[in-house]
Image: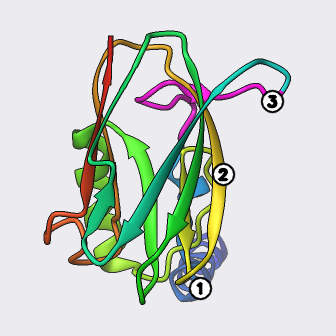
Amino acid sequence: MKKTTTIGIALIALAGATVPAMSHEQHGHATYSAGEPGNPKKPSRTIEVTMSEMAFSPFRIEVKRGEQIRFIVRNAGTEDHEFLLATTEDNLKHAEVMKKNPKMEHDDPNGVRLAPKKSAEILWKFTKAGTFEYACLIPDHRDYGMTGRIIVK
């Protein structure tokens, strides 16, 4: 009886424990679908990407497999936007999580959330050929067309 009571109390305590807000680093990215973080000691090509209300410029970027890109991401819009580089499938899954956690913190090397008039850099090496995307996963932004394409040849 004492063992059953102890287990019951432990289960009640666990059920009442608070769950911390989910952030990107808790998604379990052991690998990234669009390549890997870049090496700042190696050469890279710089590409500027501007975010505005429901659009990225440029919309389409071509790179070579193995190429390292330094993305300068600028938010020219009037609200927060983000740039998250992955496969379309991964971004769609992530967008569903963002709908439940719209204030999710970002701490991944393949993405950044920016306030209006702010900018950031992402250094990325494209190790896989294929078509990838960058998208704003703030709820509704992707749905309104805030995506871009990267073709890796």
Task: Examine the structure image and report whether residue 68 is included in the region drawn in magenta.
Answer: no
Q: Position of residue 92 (x, y in %)?
A: 23, 53
Mark 1 and mark 2: Cα distance apart in space: 34 Å
Give the Cα distance between marks 3 and 1: 39 Å
Q: Which mark is residue 121?
A: 2
Q: Position of residue 130 (x, y in %)?
A: 28, 18
Q: Amino acid at mark 3?
A: Pro
Camera-side mark, 1 or 2 = 2
Q: Is residue 63 above or below residue 123?
A: above
Q: As drawn, is 74 to the left or to the right of 123?
A: left
Q: Would you name the residue on which mark 3 appears?
A: 40
Note whether 61 is above or below 107 in the view shown: above
Among numbered discs 3 and 1, the one appearing first in the sequence: 1
Residue type beneath disc 2: Glu
Taking the spot 22% from the left edge, 41% from the top edge, the residue there is 89
Q: CA distance from mark 3 to mark 2?
A: 11 Å
Please report contact status of discs 3 and 1: CB closer than 8 Å, yes or no: no
Viewport quadrant of the N terminus = bottom right
Q: On the image, numbered disc 1 is attached to which residue?
A: 18
Taken as a whole, is the magenta stretch helix, strand or loop?
loop
Magenta highlight range: 29-40
Task: Label 1: state its secondary structure.
Answer: loop
Residue 70 percent across, percent down from the top left: 63, 37
Which mark sits nearer the N-terminus, 1 or 2?
Answer: 1
Number of marks in picture: 3
Residue at 43% over, 52% down: 84
Q: Where is residue 86 drawn, in percent x and y?
A: 38, 39
Query: Could you tell me which secondary element the residue under label 2 belongs to?
Result: strand
10 Å neighbourhood of mark 2: few (<14), some, or many (≥20)? some
2 left or right of 67 in image: right
